[in-house]
């Protein structure tokens, strides 16, 4: 569903309390005996079970929970739940094995608390808090510290919370925590930062305007009750913030200060910290640093209204989509559900609505050819005073025509659930699966854990003992609660939202002012509000699922927490035949009844766009069959994927080892006996066609990366090539493909976990027996390869495929040697970690070139690449030149880099790289990358750490000069992908060849600032005159006079002019690097020697191919079998 991703951003946690007359629910009650009221547990435990304590070192007071915190018996972490004197809740976690420390502070304030006259203020404040404090006034002091210790930080604002979080190496945690605490104590909120961050917020919003998920959720809010703050627009724009401040004659900075002083109260803040530090030390730091946060009581306003009042219930809303898909959603009004966090009632209903197999709602609607997916979820389990339950379905075009029948079927299924009455055995299956996951604890990222946990703690109904398990464990069966909730999913208590490209029966006569979404609001017909789904035709269609055969039953709960006594062993090359290579490793680190099976099946390679499209359709069909037949395995904790690509099929299964063989057996037998159903083929064909069409509206940055992938790989195909070939594919083609894809195979297999060698051999024999294939000849196994790019600077330019996209994008790939050279690979990884923060600080924070700005390392084949990217409203020529200017100046940054900071960074990276896998699944993934690639260097990480520790500044400078410095890199190789918004002035190939990129960039800046009739020749004349005379001020005056624009000293226009003048005076000649005459294949060359790629295929054909990497070793199998 298009909205599901957006909604899941708001539902990180589990949580239900009362609210509304039109639902027949009164105010909260502790006994729950009143109608549909939801019971509310007593809160005395948060008062009586905390005792005053003092920190060990400084003797600062705080309150500590004295009870026992429920946790997994196999979880090695230690926890301490405390409350500061200012009433802030803090959860400390000591993780002895963690190489990172992390913190997350969540404020229970979000979009719903924006003043109506300043929509987006909560989100804007989130941005501004990163811009320095009285104690640490530097705009990037916090980010620079995080970067020094190889960390990561971010924040998000939702309807109900604003969450700030970070993670970094353990040694830097106290310094980061101190800087972090000042966000909430003495933020500067400098006036100089307001305008810049306002542009960042505006750019963020504009990047979401063409996203159907954002549009859907925004429209749901817009058509909800205007008397409830849920209805408010949340992200913010220059108009809703800066424009409103100007109109009201007030200072936007003052409004930020007011909001911070009103809502940023310690009473509604939760802080979670974790690392390898002792609980006493974590307590010391949090108490000393966060007790200064002001306590203002609970400043939140309770709203008696509900987003779906009597006026909104019964609405039928039609909205226009950007892409070619279609869906429908039934949105039900619910009370607050926080107090039901332990009951599992919502999970019970949601899982049944998503059930597949015979008797399910999905099975009926999908076999009708009406839907491709269905879901049931709440918008957030932590919403205050209300909730919404959404039953959504992705529709086919035929399904759109039968929407009323789909509604009838949904209510018929809900009627079956109610008539069957809540089943304790089904609840117990969900509970058992959760209990197994809880008991056999698996570590997760410390960063993701603290972020999630800080939000969970906002549920005031969670008792202190359950703070660790509120999001995972399900309590005793509560049939009454399930029935009450089912009773609210009724025809008189919902609105419906239809999302499609075109609507035959609705005049979309309204427009959302923030997203431009066209929509119509009407009323549901009586047939859909008075007993829908009650007809005889539905009576025997639906039934409860059968008991789950995949839930493990032979697992003993007597396993004890164990620490491995020996270093982890490498996988054993167990067996080799003409059709199979089998690797095996018995778990020697985690001692849990889990395992993983990875299989890579090589099949004959057919690399054409037709076969790529056919492969993707086959993959979708297999997924549909697998999830239909094996959904219960997923509910039992198994994760599995069957992914065909050109020349290979990858199978991955993870979960409890007990039934893993059964899951693999079922998967392979389904594949071998696959029969293509014409109806299902039609549904999935339409879904794939829609997915290709949807790519057109993806953001410019995604398209820039797609273009570079197409350029670098050979053979490769762009989505438009596959889209054209899809039209030729029939069900008979897919059946033929499925019948013969496994005729000739060679399989690599890794079996790892709670298995014995005999089991691994037996599983491999089962795979061989079911596949029953012939040996794959070597000549049919050629792999796709990467291009060896000739020295030179190349640019590809294209208009954004979405004509409504406001942003442009540029991605620069600078080629930096080979990943086969371990030394250079490690140098690039260190370099990227040094360059990220200053690149972001300069081009995002200071210059505000766009919301998405960054640097990263990438690889294609054996090529390794330093990649820079920018997406924003700046034209790509200007953004690309700002990347150039940054790179030109960064060499000196490396020369002057403080050796002590470099040593700290190297140590923190080495510590991260030395981090051991946290689960058997992570260990399997590491080993599989070596086995699947054919490299077999299982100690590669240790070698890279040793190399890293030898590096110094000289290594970085030499590397920079060899590959990145345009003045010294004799073999400089670079490709830029530029995606130009239709709102910009993209140059023609003739203009590219005639004018310097500086003049083109300057033209784009003038156009953005409102200049009209900006002739490139006129701009170029002004640039050349300024270059000859050296009179920049006179050139700026000429620009203002000729094009009627206002030019500030630090505006993009003045910066672009200076760059253009400098370029004419001393432009590096890239023509000297590449002596080839590529005009013969239709390419254009700029005055600076930069080549414009006009035809990607012709360019690719002019380049050589890279060879494949050689294995680190040639392993010998324990058992070797050859066929005569």
Image (cartoon, rainbow, N blue to C red):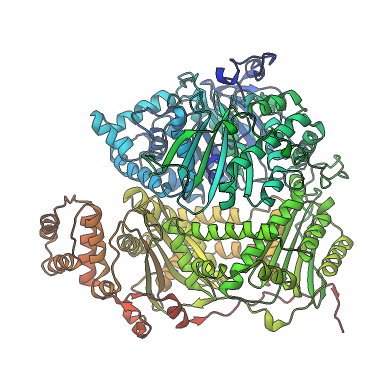
Query: Residue sitting at 59 percent across and 53 percent down?
Result: 912
Q: Nearer the viewer, residue 565 or 1009?
A: 1009
Q: Nearer the viewer, residue 778 or 500?
A: 500
* Image quadrant occupied by the C terminus: bottom right
Compared to residue 730, the image places residue 684 above or below, namely: above
Q: Nearer the viewer, residue 254 or 209?
A: 209
> x and y percent of residue 615 in the render?
63, 67
> x and y percent of residue 953 in the render?
44, 63
Query: Residue sitting at 37 percent across and 75 percent down?
Result: 1094
Relative to residue 134, is residue 613 drawn left or right? right
Compared to residue 363, the image places residue 876 above or below, namely: below
Relative to residue 939, is residue 1051 drawn left or right? left
Which quadrant of the figure has residue 1098?
bottom left
> x and y percent of residue 966 in the render?
35, 72
Relative to residue 534, is residue 1003 drawn left or right? left
> x and y percent of residue 264 in the render?
44, 27
Q: Nearer the viewer, residue 104 or 37?
A: 37
């Amino acid at each position: 569903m298009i909205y599901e991703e957006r909604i899941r951003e708001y539902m990180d946690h589990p949580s239900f309390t009362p609210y509304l007359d039109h639902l027949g629910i009164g105010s909260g009650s502790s006994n729950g005996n009143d109608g549909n009221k939801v019971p509310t547990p007593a809160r005395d435990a948060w008062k009586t079970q905390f005792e005053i304590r003092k920190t060990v070192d400084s003797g600062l007071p705080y309150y500590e929970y004295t009870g026992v915190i429920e946790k997994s018996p196999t979880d090695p972490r230690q926890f301490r739940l405390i409350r500061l004197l200012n009433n802030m809740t803090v959860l400390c976690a000591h993780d002895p094995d963690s190489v990172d420390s992390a913190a997350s502070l969540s404020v229970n304030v979000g979009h719903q608390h924006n003043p109506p006259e300043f929509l987006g203020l909560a989100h804007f404040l989130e941005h501004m808090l990163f811009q320095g404090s009285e104690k640490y006034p530097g705009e990037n002091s916090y980010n620079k510290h995080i970067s020094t210790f190889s960390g990561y930080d971010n924040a998000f604002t939702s309807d109900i919370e604003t969450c700030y979080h970070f993670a970094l190496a353990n040694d830097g945690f106290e310094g980061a925590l101190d800087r972090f605490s000042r966000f909430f104590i003495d933020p500067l909120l400098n006036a100089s930062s307001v305008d810049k961050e306002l542009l960042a917020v505006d750019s963020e919003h504009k990047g979401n305007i063409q996203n159907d998920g954002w549009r859907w959720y925004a429209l749901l809010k817009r058509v909800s009750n205007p008397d409830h703050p849920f209805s408010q627009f949340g992200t913010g724009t220059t108009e809703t913030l800066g424009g409103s401040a100007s109109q009201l004659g007030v200072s936007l900075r003052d409004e930020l200060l007011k909001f911070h002083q009103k809502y940023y109260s310690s009473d509604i803040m939760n802080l979670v910290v974790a690392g390898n530090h002792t609980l006493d030390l974590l307590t010391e730091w949090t108490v000393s640093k966060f007790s200064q946060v002001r306590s203002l009581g609970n400043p939140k306003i309770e709203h008696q209204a509900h987003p779906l009042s009597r006026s909104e219930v019964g609405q039928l809303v039609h909205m226009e989509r950007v892409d070619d898909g279609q869906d429908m959603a039934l949105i039900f009004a619910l009370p607050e559900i926080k107090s039901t966090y332990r009951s599992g009632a919502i999970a019970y209903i949601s899982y049944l609505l998503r059930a597949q197999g015979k008797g399910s709602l999905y099975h009926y609607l999908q076999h009708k050819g009406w839907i491709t997916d269905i879901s049931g979820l709440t918008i957030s389990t932590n919403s205050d005073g209300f909730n919404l339950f959404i039953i959504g379905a992705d529709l086919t075009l035929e399904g759109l025509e039968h929407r009323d029948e789909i509604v009838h079927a949904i209510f018929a299924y809900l009627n079956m659930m109610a008539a069957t009455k809540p089943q304790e055995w089904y609840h117990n299956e969900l509970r058992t699966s959760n209990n197994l996951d809880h008991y056999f604890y698996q570590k997760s990222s410390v960063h993701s854990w603290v972020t999630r946990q800080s939000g969970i703690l906002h549920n005031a109904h969670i008792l202190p003992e359950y703070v660790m398990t509120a999001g995972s464990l399900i309590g005793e069966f509560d049939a009454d609660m399930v029935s009450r909730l089912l009773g609210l999913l009724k025809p008189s208590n919902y609105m419906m939202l239809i999302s499609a490209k075109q609507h035959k029966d609705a005049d979309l006569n309204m427009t959302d002012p923030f997203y431009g979404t066209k929509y119509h609001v009407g009323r549901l017909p009586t047939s859909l509000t008075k007993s829908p789904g009650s007809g005889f035709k539905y009576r025997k269609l639906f039934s409860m699922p059968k008991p789950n055969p995949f839930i493990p039953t032979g697992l003993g709960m007597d396993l004890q927490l164990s620490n491995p006594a020996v270093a982890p062993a490498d996988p054993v090359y167990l067996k080799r035949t003409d059709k199979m290579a089998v690797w095996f490793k018995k778990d020697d680190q985690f001692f849990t009844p889990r395992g993983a099976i990875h299989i890579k099946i090589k099949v004959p390679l057919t690399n054409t766009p037709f076969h790529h499209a056919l492969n993707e359709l086959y993959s979708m069909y297999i997924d549909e069959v697998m999830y239909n037949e094996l959904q219960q395995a997923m509910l039992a904790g198994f994760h599995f994927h069957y992914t065909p690509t050109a020349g290979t099929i990858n199978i991955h299964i993870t979960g409890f080892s007990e039934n893993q063989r059964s899951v693999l057996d079922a998967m392979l037998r389904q594949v071998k006996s696959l029969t293509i159903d014409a109806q299902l083929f039609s549904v999935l064909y339409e879904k794939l066609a829609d997915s290709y069409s949807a790519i057109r509206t993806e953001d410019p940055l995604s398209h820039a990366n797609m273009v570079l992938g197409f350029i670098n790989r050979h053979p490769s195909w762009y989505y438009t090539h596959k889209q054209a070939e899809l039209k030729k594919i029939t069900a008979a083609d897919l059946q033929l493909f499925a019948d013969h894809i496994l005729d000739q195979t060679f399989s690599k297999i890794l079996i790892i976990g709670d298995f014995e060698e005999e089991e691994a051999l037996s599983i491999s024999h089962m795979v061989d027996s079911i596949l029953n294939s012939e040996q794959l000849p070597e000549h049919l196994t050629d792999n796709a390869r990467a291009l060896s790019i000739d020295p030179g600077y190349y640019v590809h330019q294209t208009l954004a495929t979405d004509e409504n996209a406001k942003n442009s994008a540029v991605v620069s790939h600078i080629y930096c040697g080979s990943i086969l050279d371990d030394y250079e690979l490690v140098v690039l990884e260190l370099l990227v970690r040094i360059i990220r923060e200053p690149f972001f600080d300069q081009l995002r924070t200071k210059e505000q070139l766009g919301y998405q700005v960054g640097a990263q390392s990438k690889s294609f084949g054996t090529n390794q690449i330093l990649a820079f990217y920018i997406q924003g409203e700046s034209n790509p020529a200007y953004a690309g030149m700002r990347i150039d200017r940054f790179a030109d100046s960064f060499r000196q940054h490396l020369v002057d880099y403080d050796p002590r900071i470099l040593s700290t960074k190297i140590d923190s990276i080495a510590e991260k790289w030395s981090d051991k896998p946290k689960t058997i699944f992570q260990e399997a993934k590491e080993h599989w990358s070596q086995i699947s690639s054919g490299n077999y260097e299982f100690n590669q990480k240790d070698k890279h750490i040793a190399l890293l520790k030898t590096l110094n500044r000289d290594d970085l400078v030499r590397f920079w000069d060899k590959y990145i410095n345009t003045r010294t890199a004799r073999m400089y190789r670079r490709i830029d992908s530029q995606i130009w918004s239709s709102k910009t002035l993209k140059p023609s190939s003739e203009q590219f060849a005639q004018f310097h990129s500086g003049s083109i960039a300057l033209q784009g800046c003038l156009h953005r600032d409102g200049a009209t009739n900006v002739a490139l020749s006129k701009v170029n004349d002004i640039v050349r005159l300024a270059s000859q005379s050296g009179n920049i001020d006179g050139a700026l005056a000429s620009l203002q006079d000729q094009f009627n624009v206002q030019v500030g000293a630090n505006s993009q226009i003045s910066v672009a002019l200076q760059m253009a003048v400098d370029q004419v005076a001393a432009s590096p000649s890239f023509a000297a690097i590449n002596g080839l005459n590529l005009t013969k294949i239709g390419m254009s060359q700029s005055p600076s020697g930069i080549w414009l790629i006009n035809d990607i295929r012709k360019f690719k054909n002019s380049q050589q191919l890279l060879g494949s990497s050689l294995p680190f070793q040639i392993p010998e199998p324990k058992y070797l079998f050859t066929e005569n």
